[in-house]
Image: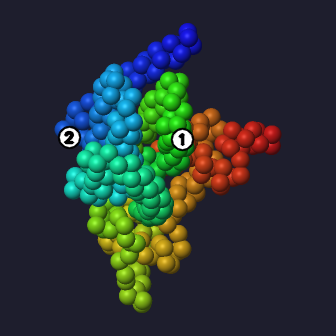
């Protein structure tokens, strides 16, 4: 009896925590009118979860929730959260695609199923909704997989530093999302205060993780490759004539910009900035790098940065720290520098220094 009472109190405590978490998180994300579009989308998604918490609060305090009809309705309303969660991912991977019209269209079938159940009390509507949510999840996973690959190609092609714009963190988020979804599905059949408490904790962990990474994420300026209307289509790069050749003068300007002017020391150098500097456009320069040099802009610029590292290691004082060498060669992120260093030398910076000290 005491254990059951404790589990019930734990449930109400975690529910209250979750209620306040989503309330303050939504206020934090939406309070700034000048916030990025990505942050606003996340804010509205979190606000929706707050309304789900409000709904749960009233229903759990009511005797009606013990009735099968209301219990099923509660689960069906919760399923609206599955598409809502994907809205943030759509906006992250294809800036500008997500809007209110598309949100309504995506949720419309679920709302029809809920309305059908409300009017008829037929559990067939719930079965149809379950099938739709599973089908939707499979399709979205397939779509997002392609979108992530396209996004990664885009930033590798246009940016020399991807540390705060890459989406590697989606792997961790996917794990927590799977964990949260698994606990929620088990809670539907377990009918346990403890499992329900575990669900609220896992949902806070999931969204806490997303909020953390979203704060670190820098919003990119997307062009036609990531334009809103092409989210579900395979992007077609701008074509150039088969006999296209970058002029010798532009190639020389490119070499001068990197070898003499050392523009690669700008840690935030972009393809557009470099193209403007050498008197060409981004499309021509990108085509030259990809088709003639068989490399991406990211790898091309970081090759010059690593050459600078070699130069500093050969001529600079041994007292230079890893951070000083990284900054002096154009890296503004130690994690990026560490990965590049290990890839180049086959060992960490510390091991390299130890090896040099022995000779």
| Residue 273 image offset from top left, x and y in percent | 34, 61
Residue located 33% across and 73% down the image: 280
Relative placement, left or right, of 283 versus 160 is: left
Q: Where 238 falls versus 7 (above or below)? A: below
Between marks 1 and 2 in the image, the one whose residue lies nearer the viewer? 1
Q: Give the secondary structure at mark 2.
A: loop
Question: Is 88 left, or right, of 104 in this rendering?
Answer: right
Please tell me which residue is depicted at 20% across the width and 40% down the height of the picture.
Answer: 34
Q: Position of residue 180 (x, y in %)?
A: 50, 38
- State the residue lying farthest toward the left: 33
Which residue ends up furthest to the top in the rendered image?
2
Q: Which residue is mark 2?
A: 34
Q: Is residue 288 above or below residue 189?
A: below
Q: For the N terminus, which image quadrant?
A: top right
Quarter placement of the C terminus = top right
Q: Residues within 10 Å of mark 1 (few under 14, many from 20)?
A: few
Left or right of 30: which side holds 194? right
Q: Earlier in the sequence, mark 1 or mark 2?
A: 2
> Is residue 288 depicted above or below 177 in this figure?
below
Q: Residue at x 42, y 52 (%)?
A: 127
Q: Which numbered disc covers residue 31?
A: none
| Pointer 1 residue | 182
Q: CA distance from mark 1 to mark 2?
A: 37 Å
- Give the x, y percent position of residue 30: 24, 36
SS for dot 1 = helix
């Amino acid at each position: 009896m005491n254990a059951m009472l404790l589990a019930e109190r734990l449930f109400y405590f975690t529910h209250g925590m979750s209620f306040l978490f989503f309330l303050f998180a939504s206020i934090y994300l939406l309070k700034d009118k000048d916030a990025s579009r990505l942050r606003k989308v996340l804010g509205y998604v979190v606000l929706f979860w707050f309304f789900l918490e409000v709904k749960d609060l009233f229903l759990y305090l009511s005797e009606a929730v013990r009735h099968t009809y209301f219990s099923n309705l509660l689960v069906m309303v919760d399923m609206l959260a599955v598409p809502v969660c994907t809205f943030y991912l759509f906006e992250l991977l294809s800036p500008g695609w997500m809007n209110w019209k598309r949100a309504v269209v995506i949720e419309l079938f679920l709302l029809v199923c809920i309305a059908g159940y409300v009017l008829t009390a037929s559990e067939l509507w719930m079965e149809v909704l379950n099938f739709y949510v599973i089908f939707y999840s499979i399709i979205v996973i397939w779509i997002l997989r392609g979108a992530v690959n396209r996004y990664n190609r885009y930033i590798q092609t246009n940016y020399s530093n991807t540390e705060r714009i890459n989406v590697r963190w989606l792997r961790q988020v996917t794990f927590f999302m799977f964990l949260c979804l698994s606990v929620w599905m088990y809670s539907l059949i377990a009918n346990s205060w403890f499992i329900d408490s575990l669900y609220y904790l896992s949902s806070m962990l999931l969204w806490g993780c997303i909020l953390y990474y979203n704060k670190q994420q820098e919003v990119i300026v997307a062009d036609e490759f990531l334009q809103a209307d092409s989210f579900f289509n395979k992007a077609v790069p701008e074509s150039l004539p088969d006999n296209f050749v970058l002029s010798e003068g532009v190639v020389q300007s490119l070499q001068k910009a990197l070898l003499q002017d050392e523009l690669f020391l700008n840690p935030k150098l972009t393809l557009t900035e470099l193209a403007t500097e050498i008197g060409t456009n981004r499309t021509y320069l990108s085509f030259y790098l990809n088709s003639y040099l068989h490399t991406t802009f990211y790898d091309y610029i970081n090759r010059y940065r690593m050459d600078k590292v070699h130069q500093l290691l050969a001529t600079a004082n041994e007292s230079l720290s890893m951070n000083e060498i990284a900054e002096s060669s154009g890296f503004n992120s130690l994690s990026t520098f560490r990965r590049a260093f290990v890839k180049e030398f086959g060992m960490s910076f510390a091991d390299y220094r130890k090896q040099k000290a022995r000779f």
